[in-house]
Image: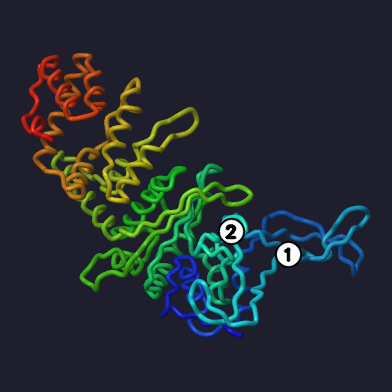
Amino acid sequence: MTVEISLDHATGNFWVDTGLVILAQHFGEGSHEPDVVLQWLLQRLVQKTGKKGEYFDPNEKLLREYEKVNWAYPSNLFIKVSGATPKAKIDGKTYFLAPPTFELKLNLGKKAESCDLCGEKTPLTYAKMWMYAFVVDPQKFGTFYPGAKRGLRICGRCALAGLAGYLGWLWKAQGRDAIHFFVFYSPDLHELQRLYREVIQIFQLKQEGGGTAPVAFFGPYLHETALGLLLELFSHVEKSELLSEEGRALLASILGEGPSKPPAPLSLYVITGKPGQAFNMQQFQEFSHLHALYQLHKRWKGVLQELAEARRIENLQPHPALTQVFWQFHVRRERQYETLWRDRIAWAVLEFQDPFPFIESFLFEVRAREKNPQPFVFGTLEVFEHYAREVLEMDEQLLRTLSGFGHNLGNKAQESNEMGLLYALRNARNADEFFRVLNDIQFRLELTVPEDLLSIR
């Protein structure tokens, strides 16, 4: 029996389709022997650990040294299959009788049935975690996908593609606190193959100690690290020391740049959890508005460039400046940084929701309590004003009014030692209470409240 590798028919499962792309990239489309594919995948996923072990050679009747191997990190958080090398007790100690090797078998049934993932009618096997990263014991939780209590049953092609899926991700580790996995997906598998070949694979080859995902910033939370990845990825469209011209052009096309046909759908799947003996998944999220996020990123860079020109700031680099706008939302606590505010703001931006409650929370809970509070970095106000105007569709004149009055109010409250008024304004529970505080501001700070604010309902 052979397995058919084709990019013309996506399964719709992001993990398996990613694996199909990996297999097509190496073997090409067509029919292939399962054992040949399996051996190649083992060679890619098993690596030497740098440690030595001993085994007993029964022919020579002596101990020999061998190099230990294990599943490559971080796939070893998911794949726990070990070899079945025979052992024997020699002088009271148990030894392998040959260097242990890892073996994987498909164990397909004889009856042709419909695969739970691709629907093809063919002999099936029960999915194991080495075939699909998110399968769990059906006796405990059912399966992660598609939720069949009997366990996930898949064909040989999907099983091999599932194992290949471990070669298609990008990842970033935050010490022992968290590890993030990123899988880009498009139902157009030919386009996905080009993305893998020209972009993802290049990042994988430049692996550093903390992972393969290029990030502008990262932390223990999912959304902040996802935003850090996307900001860095978007920056490679304009200029890149890693990607080729062809790779940059492809990335631009996939993100909707240029006069070509409308781009194929593109999603980013992010999985966050804790590493340990095994992976403890805590969050799973799909982001499907990458084209719109890229356009927002471009407009933000334009806003910062215009601001720099207006202030006569030379040699400003918009991408690092934009990165700093989001990076700043953290606070140092003892020996580490708390980045919860950055994560909440990142969530709002990635979902095109309102980030201002989280920015306000950061100001009152972090900056207002600092002995020497730092101002926001260059361009912060302008970046979020643009977001409020373009994404939240707030009135531009009202934004100017709020900006001007807020600046004057903050200065006056600090000069008059009346910071309590700011807290009272923030904590107003309804419109009547809000207007009552505004009235106090007029009398106690002798500050005129704009009529636009008094007409808000």
Which residue is the site of mark 1? 83
Q: How busy is the neighbourhood of tag 1: few (under 14 within 10 Å), some, or many (20 plus)? A: few
Mark 1: secondary structure: loop
Q: How many marks?
A: 2
Separation of marks 1 and 2 at Cα, in angstroms: 21 Å
Residue placed most toward the observer, 365 or 457 = 457
Task: Give the x, y percent position of residue 210.
Answer: 51, 49
Left or right placement of residue 447 versus residue 148 in this view? left
- Picture quadrant where residue 339 is located: top left
- Expressed as whole percent of the image width and height from the top left, the position of residue 12 reads 42, 70
Mark 2 is on which residue type?
A: Val
Q: Which residue is mark 2?
A: 136
Judged from the image, the secondary structure of the residue bearing numbered disc 2 is loop
Q: Is residue 120 above or below residue 75?
A: below
Q: Work out which residue is located at the far front of the displayed protein and give it.
A: 149
Identity of the residue furthest to the right in this view: 91
Q: Quadrant of residue 241?
A: bottom left
Q: Is residue 456 left or right of residue 321?
A: left
The N terminus sits in image quarter = bottom right
Does the rendering let one see residue 435? yes
Q: Position of residue 266 (x, y in %)?
A: 34, 64
The residue sitting at 32% across, 56% down in the picture is: 234
Count residues near mark 2 (Cα–Cα under 10 Å), then give few for <14, some for 14-19, many for 20+. some
The residue positioned 12% from the left and 43% from the top of the image is: 395
Vertical placement of residue 123 versus 409, above or below: below
- On-image quarter of the C terminus: top left
Q: Are marks 1 and 2 in contact (CB under 8 Å)?
A: no
